């Protein structure tokens, strides 16, 4: 039994030893630091950490260390990666309102100074507090960074963006003992469509190029199709032309074959017509000859007879006319000779009378020149019978003359008639004046017509 | 407890280390370099050691000075 007791005691001691060791020995894993403060935990010497003026606590990373319970306290401080996402609304430096979403991957730096800085600030705080604090910090910095850059810069100039982040965060992170492994902008939204519009010209250019290319290809394809169609149509046309040619030949042959019968018939009929025509001509010749014999030849004979008769009659008339003409000529010549002889005789008589009158007139003119009144008286005396006859002619026209006054009336009437005949004296006077004027008037022409001797017809009854 | 880890011993000093520029280092800029340290690599904010130097991304640089908490001054690696 003592052996058993001893063994039990030894086991108990061993267990106790293990328990004590477990109580005082702490191990820091690679991603954490043990922050030990308390008795004897004053950190490294200045030789260990140049520039360290004594931080007042001990930092253990990646190894075990003994912690005296009751005299020292130990806390684990997580050094691993932490992540926070950021959503920041801020205008860019072109005053375009943006919503920037980013993610920050950060950790407590591994050097003792950084661990000390971080530990002093965050040791007692839980994880959420730490992350939210850091989130606010980064959000503020990101807002400042966005405000200092253009949208295009944020989108395209990665080097500039990280440089800006580093510049902005370096001092703050140093104070907090943190390092940023990565800060990524996940998304940039703009409410005014700036980013969309940025891409639109290029998109439109690409679209235009695509449409142009499509249109060109379409055009080429259409051209090729049309050329092919045209060639097809050409082939079809050629084929149809040849088919039509052959069909025409076939039709011609068919038509000729079909017309052979009617043609023969027509030719036969033509022969018939020719024969009939010849017969008709013969008939016509016969009729003509009949007419010639029956009508024309008798007519010719009659005409010849009449012409001959007319000719003979004409000859007879001509001969008769010639005979008459000769007779008339001869008679005319005889009459002309007679007339010429008569005319010569008359002319000689007239000439002789004219000469006698001229001698008379000459003698009268001489006598007139010597004794006018005698000539006048002689002239009146020569013409007195005519004068008296003219006065008596006024009575000559009276059928019945009734004398109322008896002898006196008769005498009176004769006196008046003589008075009227006395009017002839006026004529005689004018005759004398004309003679006196030396006119060659023949005194014989002074007939008995007297203007004043109009018969004063007195009709009593 | 007697033997201290590399972290505690202070061999996390970055001075003298060479690293690659991941954010342009130059006057007026806050650059960034990645340095091998503590068995891994960490990013540090970097400024030019000589005020007029500019180191574009990808340049190999050497840390000349270190300032807490995470600032290094770099010049071109030789």
Image: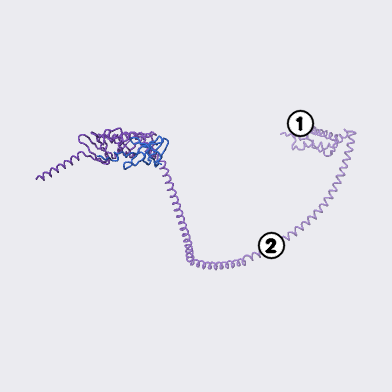
Chain colours: A purple, B blue
Q: Quadrant of the C terminus of chain A?
A: top right
Give a yes or no on whether discs 1 and 2 share a subunit.
Answer: yes
Whether residue B42 appears in this view of the structure is yes
Residue A18, image x, y percentages: 18, 42
Residue B67, image x, y percentages: 35, 35
Above or below for A343 versus A249: above
Q: Quadrant of the N terminus of chain A?
A: top left
Residue linked to disc 2:
A307
The numbered dot on residue A405 is: 1
Please identify the quarter of the rendering in which residue A162 is found: top left
Q: Chain of mark 1?
A: A
Q: Nearer the viewer, residue A40 or A120?
A: A40
Residue at mark 1 to residue at mark 2: CA–CA distance: 92 Å
Residue at 87 percent across and 40 percent down: it is: A358
Q: Nearer the viewer, residue B63 or A443?
A: B63
Residue A152 lies left or right of residue A16; in this view the side is right
Whether residue A196 appears in this view of the structure is no
Residue B63 lies left or right of residue A262; in this view the side is left
Residue A114, image x, y percentages: 30, 36
């Amino acid at each position: 039994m003592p052996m058993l007791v001893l063994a039990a005691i030894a086991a108990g001691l061993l267990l106790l030893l293990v328990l004590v060791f477990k109580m005082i020995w702490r191990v820091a894993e690679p991603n954490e630091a043990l922050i030990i403060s308390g008795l004897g935990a004053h950190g490294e010497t200045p030789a260990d950490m140049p520039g360290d003026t004594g931080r007042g606590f001990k930092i253990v990373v990646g190894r075990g260390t003994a912690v005296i319970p009751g005299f020292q306290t130990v806390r684990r401080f997580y050094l691993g990666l932490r992540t926070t996402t950021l959503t920041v609304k801020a205008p860019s430096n072109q005053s375009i309102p943006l919503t920037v979403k980013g993610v920050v991957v950060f950790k407590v730096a591994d050097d003792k100074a950084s661990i000390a800085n971080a530990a002093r600030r965050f040791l007692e705080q839980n994880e959420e507090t730490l992350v939210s604090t850091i989130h606010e910090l980064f959000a503020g910095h990101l807002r400042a960074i966005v405000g200092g850059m253009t949208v295009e810069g944020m989108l395209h100039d990665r080097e500039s963006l990280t440089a800006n982040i580093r510049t902005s965060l370096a001092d703050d992170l140093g104070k907090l003992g943190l390092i940023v492994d990565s800060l990524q902008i996940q998304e940039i939204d703009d409410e005014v469509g700036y980013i969309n519009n940025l891409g639109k010209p290029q998109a439109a250019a690409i679209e235009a190029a695509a449409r142009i290319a499509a249109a060109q290809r379409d055009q080429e394809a259409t051209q090729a199709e049309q050329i092919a169609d045209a060639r097809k149509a050409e082939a079809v046309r050629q084929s149809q032309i040849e088919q039509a040619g052959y069909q025409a030949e076939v039709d011609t042959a068919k038509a000729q074959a079909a017309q052979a019968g009617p043609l023969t018939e027509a030719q036969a009929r033509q022969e018939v017509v020719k024969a009939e025509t010849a017969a008709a001509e013969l008939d016509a010749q016969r009729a003509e000859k009949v007419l010639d014999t029956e009508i024309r030849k008798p007519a010719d004979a009659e005409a010849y007879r009449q012409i001959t008769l007319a000719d003979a009659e004409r000859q007879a008339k001509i001969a008769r006319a010639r005979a008459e003409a000769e007779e008339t000529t001869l008679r005319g010549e005889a009459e002309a000779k007679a007339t010429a002889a008569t005319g010569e005789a008359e002319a000689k008589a007239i000439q002789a009378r004219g000469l006698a009158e001229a001698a008379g007139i000459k003698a009268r003119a001489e006598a007139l020149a010597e004794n006018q009144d005698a000539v006048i008286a002689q002239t009146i005396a020569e013409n007195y019978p005519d004068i008296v006859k003219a006065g008596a002619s006024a009575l000559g026209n009276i059928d019945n003359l009734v004398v109322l006054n008896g002898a006196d009336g008769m005498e009176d009437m004769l006196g008046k008639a003589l008075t009227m005949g006395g009017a002839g004296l006026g004529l005689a006077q004018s005759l004398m004046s004309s003679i006196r004027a030396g006119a060659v008037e023949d005194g014989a022409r002074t007939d008995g017509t007297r203007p004043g001797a109009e018969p004063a017809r007195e009709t009593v009854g | 407890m007697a033997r201290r880890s590399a972290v505690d011993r202070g061999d996390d000093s970055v001075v003298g280390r060479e690293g690659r520029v991941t954010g342009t280092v130059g006057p007026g800029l806050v650059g960034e370099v990645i340095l091998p340290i503590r068995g891994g690599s960490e990013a540090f904010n970097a400024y030019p050691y000589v005020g007029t130097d500019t180191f574009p991304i990808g340049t190999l640089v050497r840390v000349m000075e270190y300032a807490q908490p995470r600032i290094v001054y770099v010049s071109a690696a030789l």
